[in-house]
Image (tube, grey):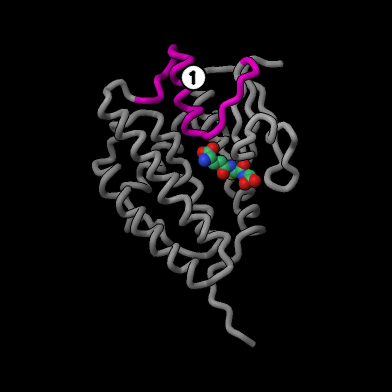
Amino acid sequence: MAEVQLLGNWASPFSKRVEIALKLKGIQYEYIEEDIPINKSPRVVKYNPIYKKIPVFLHDGKSIAESLLILEYIDETWKEGTPLLPNDPYQRAMARFWAKFMDEKCLPEILKLCYESNYEVRMKAKGELHELLKLLENELIKDNTNLFGEYIEIVSILVTYWIGIIQEAVQVDILKKEEFPNICGWADKLMSRSFIKESRLPPRDKLLVFYKTYAKPLIKEVPQ
Ligand SMILES: N[C@@H](CCC(=O)N[C@@H](CS)C(=O)NCC(=O)O)C(=O)O
């Protein structure tokens, strides 16, 4: 068994976070693609019996789940190479704060926008997501300077890459350049960085097809 293995899925921003961190640190790993959620393998259940989700990170046979925790584990275990979290305790706390904000506040609204069947619920999620992105725009990124380390850049791919594709799939226009210059500027800068390019984010067109398969456009259906 390789020293480091990652159970992931090509379309998951969470497993991509881990791959980016491994690339940035220069850690060799074996990647195992999991067909989630359709054919969940016994491996995923064995190594993540609590949530039964990917990513699962295996290091010398020990398993760790939850992308944010995996990033911290990688940072603490491979101290050489680029640090992920900032050194300063306040900045570190802020990095964790905004990561939690993205996963616990933004993500549930993204999921509702994509997968809820009720139109009103989806419209409400669209409005909520807009407000949350405004907070990111005004509070996290401000002057286009990131004080909170590579960690938050990696975590943010959910916002800086995935949301743009999701909004196209469901035919809404939340994250507009004119309205969110900080987030969009941050995204452009991030996408041009070599470690992001090397870790190969899933191609836009392929992800778009994926989301169009599972998420309907946000259009009010008129009863016949
Ligand atoms: N909070 C988790 C989220 C992981 C997650 O939602 N993984 C999804 C794929 S994107 C999954 O494995 N879903 C399978 C399922 O729900 O059965 C993390 O940060 O790692």
Q: Is residue 13 visible?
A: no
The picture quadrant where one finds residue 31 is top right
- Chain part drawn in magenta: 60-85
Dot 1 lies on which element? helix
Residue ID for mark 1: 25
Classify 19 as above or below 220: above
Q: Residue at x 34, y 38 (%)?
A: 97
Answer left or right for 140 relative to 63.
Answer: left
Relative to the observer, which residue lies in front, 197 or 77?
Answer: 77
Residue 150 found in image quarter: top left
Q: Nearer the viewer, residue 124 or 171?
A: 124
Residue at screen point 61% across, 55% down: 211
Q: Amino acid at mark 1?
A: Lys
Query: Where is residue 59 drawn, in percent x and y?
Result: 60, 18
**In the rendered image, is residue 10 in sight?**
yes
Q: Is residue 65 magenta?
A: yes
**Picture residue at 71% right of the left edge, 16% below the top:** 1
